[in-house]
Amino acid sequence: MKRLSILLLILCFALPTAAQENKFRIAVFDPTSSGTSIDDGTKIAIREIISSTIVNTGKHAIVERSLLEKVMQEQAFSQSGIVDDSQMAEIGKLAGANKIVVSVVTLTGGRNMLSVKMIDVKTANVERQKVKVVTSGELLDVVEPMTLNLIDADAPTEEQVTATITSEASEIVPIPAQNEILLYLPAGYEPKKEKERDLPLIVKLDKEVIGSGTLSGGFTLRVKNLAAGEHIVRIGNIKIKIDSSQYNYFEFQIYRWNYLGKAMYGISLKEQKTIK
């Protein structure tokens, strides 16, 4: 019965058009982590950059995320409950995929190792794998070229896709005063065609609004006498955990990408340290 309902879903979501008939269908799973925990914003960014890179080459089709999640629910799996490549391959097969792409971020020697694999759903064999070791600030920048290498494709033109942009500091970072916590988001990069659609960002700390900014403007926020311990910072709709018992400076980064012609935005924690 489960397989029948899944088949009906596949027909609803994945009925091929004439242009898609000869394309491989690829299911992209959320990245997992080993040796470190990456925040949800970074996970989404890695997954969406992989998906948009594959789509924009025009060579392959991506399995709808909603269909993949529905199949996992039907099979009583959550993303965190899938423990090996063969289980992911089975989920991909039920969702109508020919191949799946899985990625793993591993903290090693203070740097991040990103591994991206393409797996055949029929055999569960790894067909191709790309690995790169980078700093945390470089992590998102290498996802697109690694994906293109994985599928043997050239980079799309600027008209086809806007590459991931990592924000750069646009001002001198102030030093936190005694008993102050500094939350710093440098100005991001906005292509000319999207400046008129700048994204306002409401900032909350443990559910309390503490300030605001914009995607292209950034912000610097000082919080006085914050209790030591873990706190939740919300920037827009992104939730990030910080630990004020160890650090008093938190720098975030902005990234953006195009997914099926729609601009997507994300924010992740780039650096945390103690400034005396």
Image: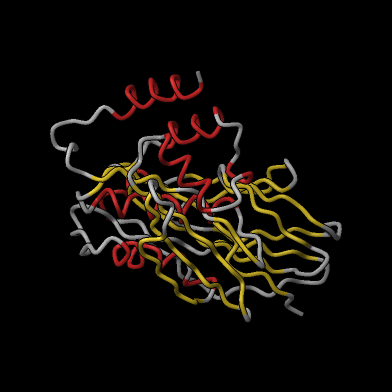
Nearest the eye: 58 or 49: 58
**Quadrant location of residue 180?**
bottom right
Nearest the eye: 190 or 84: 84
Rendered location of residue 152, percent (x, y): 24, 64
Nearest the eye: 196 or 133: 133
Task: Name the residue at 31% across, 48% down.
Answer: 194
Does any portion of residue 16 appear in the rendered image? yes
Q: Is residue 157 left or right of residue 274?
A: left
Colouring method of the image: secondary structure
Task: Name the residue at 51% across, 22% down.
Answer: 2
Does any portion of residue 170 appear in the rendered image? no
Q: Is 177 placed above or below 155 here?
A: below
Q: Is residue 151 left or right of residue 234?
A: left
Q: Could you tell me how many numbered marks the image carries?
A: 0
**Quadrant location of residue 33?**
bottom right
Rendered location of residue 208, percent (x, y): 73, 42
**Quadrant location of residue 112?**
bottom right
Rendered location of residue 137, percent (x, y): 51, 71
Which quarter of the rendered picture does the C terminus lie within?
Answer: bottom right
> Looking at the image, which residue sits at the far front?
123
Rendered location of residue 110, percent (x, y): 63, 79
Q: Is residue 234 left or right of residue 42?
A: right
